[in-house]
Image (tube, rainbow, N blue to C red):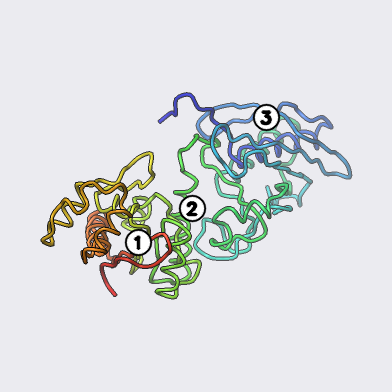
Amino acid sequence: MPVTGLRYGWTTGACATAAATAAYAALLTGEFPDPVTITLPRGQRPAFALNSTALADGRASASVVKDAGDDPDVTHGAVIGVTVGHGVPGSGVVFVAGSGVGTVTKPGLPLAVGEPAINPVPRRMIREHIAEVAAAHGGSGDVVVEIGVVGGVELAVRTWNPRLGIVGGLSILGTTGVVVPFSCSAWIDSIRRGIDVARALGHRHVAGCTGSTSERAVAALYGLPDDALLDMGDFAGAVLKYLRRHPIERLTVAGGIGKLSKLAAGHLDLHSGRSQVDPAVLADLVTAVGHDASLVADAATALDALRRCQAAGVPLGDLVAARARLVALDVLRGAPVAVDVVVIDRQGDIVGRSGPA
């Protein structure tokens, strides 16, 4: 759905396609089209201004500054550079990872191990535009396309890439070419790729964690490696729905009492702007074990409710974990995934558990 009042942006894949198109046109004609217009998978035709150009020794280079619109994208403002050179006759388009673009080192991604982290849709877009330029200017279309991102190594640390086994930089991403502000599609896609990698590596147990504190707690509890830990953030539903279609033997859901109280209430998006802790649900949990609802009815937060219950000897953390587990199992709809839930406090101490030990 469109996000009213917010400006859309362009993916790294769209920027790389624009830079590759301009570079190959210059390689064949000696002139860089600036701005350069490309066609996105859904038919939009944005124009991109070139940030830099170079033409020498049978190679042409162009760069584009990524504009993510109003989305808080880690790559907003990054310089996406592409160098195009003539390839071996009959080779088609060969992709190379330049500085700041990563290389795939683990199975489970839609690219083979050893391939540059340039995703399938950007590859297709670049191939199509190279073919158009070749047809317009008498080229063969046999080229080597090297894509780089200035500062990509440093930016990649702030993404899922290290955990997914993409080393040396960022991925060139995008399925539509358009960045929708606050759509969170990139995060959800990373969750799915994390599950794919974990399965391909043979992991039988993964953990969906709401943040770094819960990650540390569950890693210490079960000895899980980094590539079995899914940074699900607020997107519990994304983890559960993908595992419903692509099961792994065991899932641990781990998070703070506030986030998991929302899951216990049936919310699959745990973001504070899209769901709230429901005091009535906490009251139901407390009364179900024989205590008065007034214990938690006027609690300011889920953490406040937890502390009150701890003082009264009521295992609210366990109760929240058990209810959240039932919600998770309901979303999984009988998929062969064993589920346990681990609830932590702000210090990372486990205050509730439910499910297989």
Q: CA distance from mark 1 to mark 3?
A: 43 Å
Q: Residue 188: percent from the left, percent from the top?
A: 44, 49
- As helix, strand or loop, the secondary structure at mark 1 comes to strand
- Is residue 293 shown left or right of residue 268? left
- Is residue 245 shown left or right of residue 54? left
Q: Splitting the image into 4 quarters, where does residue 125 fall?
A: top right
Tell me which label, 1 or 2, sits earlier in the chain: 2
Q: Hey, which residue is sitting farthest front in the picture?
A: 311
Residue for point 41% across, 68% down? 218
Tell me which label, 2 or 3, sits earlier in the chain: 3
Residue for badge 2: 190
Q: CA distance from mark 2 to mark 3?
A: 27 Å
Tell me which label, 1 or 3, sits earlier in the chain: 3
Image vertical order of residue 104 relative to residue 204, above or below: above
- Is residue 43 shown left or right of residue 118? left
| Residues marked 2 and 3 touching at CB (< 8 Å) | no
Q: Residue 57: percent from the left, percent from the top?
A: 89, 45
Mark 1 or mark 2, which is nearer to you?
1
Q: Residue 13: percent from the left, percent from the top?
A: 60, 42
Task: Name the mark on residue 48.
Answer: 3
Mark 1 or mark 3, which is nearer to you?
1
